[in-house]
Amino acid sequence: VGKDENSYFTRMAADMMYEGLLTLDPVTEDFAPSLATHWKISEDKKDFSFRIDPRARWADGKPVVAQDVVDTWKLRVDEGILTPETNELFKKYDQPVAVSKYIVTTKVNEKLADWRLFLYFSTMAILPSHYVGGITGKEYLEKFQFDAVPGTGPYVIDKNDIKKGQSISIKRRSDYWAENDSANIGLNNFDVVRFDVVTDQKLEFEKFKKGDIDV
């Protein structure tokens, strides 16, 4: 999240480590449960409610709660994360409200309801409040530039597996909370995915031919 988030590596790592309230069914493209088990959209398509799965856990073992959604939104709209597009997108919603431990609501503040606004909010990668709550966007970028915030997804990045300018390894969790859910059967099969940093395209091609890198 934040400055330079729209890069190939960052997007792939985020998809492996973080989850949204909902996801999209890969066959039907209908909304499907992820961190939330239930959701509701008002008739005017502007009020959204979600019920978080009580089973959901962060990689550090703490439960996922409604406040995590609130503090993720606060970080997304903080101009200190240096991502104007994200800032503007999530300002289209009122600040989410933690109605209870597991129920969170928000409201679109645009005049016209756009179906994409439910998509964007419901699939927003949720971050842990006990890491990002109460800090500014500037502080977030300084603190977590080379230390990934734990997610709820099947993979983690340990800061000891970050070799600056050389490689980053992403490792599969042994305690992923949704591992046995039907939507995840057959997925997440690699124990370790390592990204090597190669800044010379010719060298990259030679390493590929030798089998030192495979993608």
Image (tube, helix red, strand yellow):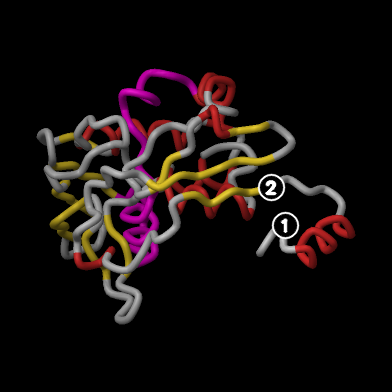
Q: Earlier in the sequence, mark 1 or mark 2?
A: 2
Numbered range of the magenta stretch: 108-136
Callout 1 environment at 10 Å: few (<14), some (14 to 19), or many (20+)? few
Q: Residue at x 81, y 57 (%)?
A: 204
Tag count: 2
In the image, is 178 to the left or to the right of 122?
Answer: left
Q: Residue 196 carries which label?
A: 2
Q: Residue at x 45, y 37 (%)?
A: 76
Q: Nearer the viewer, mark 1 or mark 2?
A: 1
Residue 202 at x, y percent in the picture: 89, 59
Disc 2 marks a residue whose amino acid type is Asp
Q: Residue 212 carries which label?
A: 1
Q: Which residue is drawn at 15% across and 48% down?
A: 53
**What secondary structure is found at the residue carrying circle 2?**
strand
Disc 1 marks a residue whose amino acid type is Asp
Residue 114 is inside the magenta segment: yes
Callout 2 environment at 10 Å: few (<14), some (14 to 19), or many (20+)? some
In the image, is 12 to the left or to the right of 149?
Answer: right
Viewer-closest of 124 and 174: 174
